[in-house]
Amino acid sequence: MWPSFLHHLSLHFPIVVSMALAVAATYALRNDEPPTLIPLLRWGGLANLALTSLALLSGLIAGGLSGGSDSLSHHRLLGITAFAVIALAALSYDYGTRHNIADWRRFGGLLWWVASFAVIGAGHWGGLAEHRNVIPW
């Protein structure tokens, strides 16, 4: 019971923060990376990676590595994809910040858009798997 509860607690942060980081990274790209946004994008990305890791692990413990409905299977695969893209985005941006390489920061910033779509897809299929009897369509 606790892994499922922990999964539901930890999954909302990555949804919102991925989208906020995508918007902030786009603003930073358009305005030649204001120095105040670089630490926000770096530490926000690493915090998002930490909570995404918690959501992924608790979800895999609660739901298992295989089985379940098609919706749960799609949710699981998109959740793993979202984790991989979030890890790549956060670590790329962190690497670019530590070594002062703007191209790595830009790459990490653009990946937040990919992460946002992966998180939205995972959330859609997770909601469909969990609340199918409540959703009217």
Image (cartoon, grey):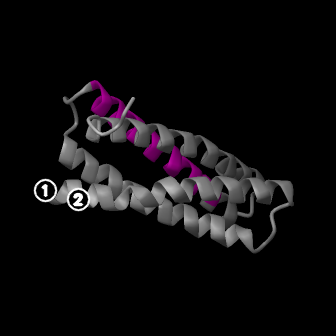
- How far from the left and from the top, in percent, is residue 83? 44, 46
Kindly report the secondary structure that dominates the magenta region of the rendered protein. Answer: helix
**Label 2 neighbour load within 10 Å: few <14, some 14-19, many 20+:** few
Kind of residue at disc 2: Phe
Kind of residue at disc 1: Met
At x 31% / y 30%, what residue is drawn? 71
Q: Which residue is mark 2?
A: 5
**Label 1 neighbour load within 10 Å: few <14, some 14-19, many 20+:** few
One can see residue 91 in this view: no
> Is there a contact, CB below 8 Å, between mark 1 and mark 2?
yes
Does the magenta segment cover residue 79? Answer: yes
Left or right: residue 90 compared with residue 11 = right
As drawn, which residue projects farthest toward the top? 70
Span colored in magenta: 70-93
- How far from the left and from the top, in percent, is residue 59? 27, 48
The image quadrant that residue 2 belongs to is: bottom left
| Residue 1, numbered circle | 1
